[in-house]
Image (spheres, helix red, strand yellow):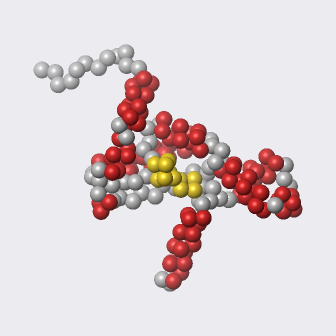
Amino acid sequence: MAYFKPASPEVNFAKLDEAVLNFWEENNTFERSVERRSVDNSYVFYDGPPFATGLPHYGHIMTSIIKDVVPRFFTMKGKRVERRFGWDCHGVPVEFELEKEMGLNGRSDILEMGIGNFNEACRVIVLRYTREWQEVITRIGRWVDFEHDYKTMNPDYMETVWWVFKTLYDKG
C-alpha cells in the first residue's frame, strides 16, 4: 500500500515556487503567523541590516536564508516573531559613493555644497536600491516586514541608540 502519490518527474520548480509565493501573499501567511501568536509569547530576533548602498549579492542571500530559518523555527514552536527589515544607512560607504558620483573632493567640496544638501543627497542614495532588495528578499521566500522597516538614519532610531548607551552608562 502506497502512502504517497508518485511524484511527477515533469515538475516545473520555477512555476511551483511562484505558486507558493503567490499563495503566501494572497493569504497574508506571514502576517497571520505573527498576529495569531500572543505578544506575551514573543521571541525577539535582531536582524542586522545590510548596507543600503548596493544591490543584494550571493553573500546577502546566504545570510538572509539563515536569518529566515531561525525565526521560522521559533514561529513553528508557537512563538510570536516579528521580523522588521532594516537598513544600515550610516557611514563612509554612503558618503564615499555620493562623493564619487558627484565628483566631490573632500571636506571643502562638501561644505560648498552645504551639509544639509549633502545629507539629503546621501538619503537619496540610501533609498536607491530598496525596491530591488524587497524583490530579492521576497523572491527567495524570506518572511520580513518591509512595511514597518527601520532605517538607521531616522531620528527615532538614532535617539533609541543614544538612550541605550546612556542607560548602560548610568548602570555603570
Whether residue 124 is visible: yes
Q: Nearer the viewer, residue 170 or 40?
A: 40
Whether residue 73 is visible: no
Q: Residue at x 29, y 48 (%)?
A: 76
In the rendered view, does 56 fall on the left or right side of 71?
A: right
Q: Residue at x 62, y 59 (%)?
A: 153
Position of residue 55 measured from the top left corner of the image (x, y, whole percent): 62, 41
In the rendered view, does 96 fall on the left or right side of 36?
A: right
Position of residue 69 measured from the top left corner of the image (x, y, whole percent): 39, 46
Q: Residue at x 42, y 44 (%)?
A: 143
Q: Quadrant of residue 60?
A: top right
Q: Quadrant of the N terminus?
A: top left
Q: Residue at x 37, y 40 (%)?
A: 28
Looking at the image, residue 85 lies above or below residue 154: above
Looking at the image, residue 130 lies above or below residue 106: above
Looking at the image, residue 165 lies above or below residue 170: above
In the rendered view, does 1 fall on the left or right side of 166?
A: left
Q: Quadrant of residue 116?
A: bottom right
Position of residue 65 measured from the top left corner of the image (x, y, whole percent): 45, 43
Position of residue 121 measured from the top left corner of the image (x, y, whole percent): 74, 52
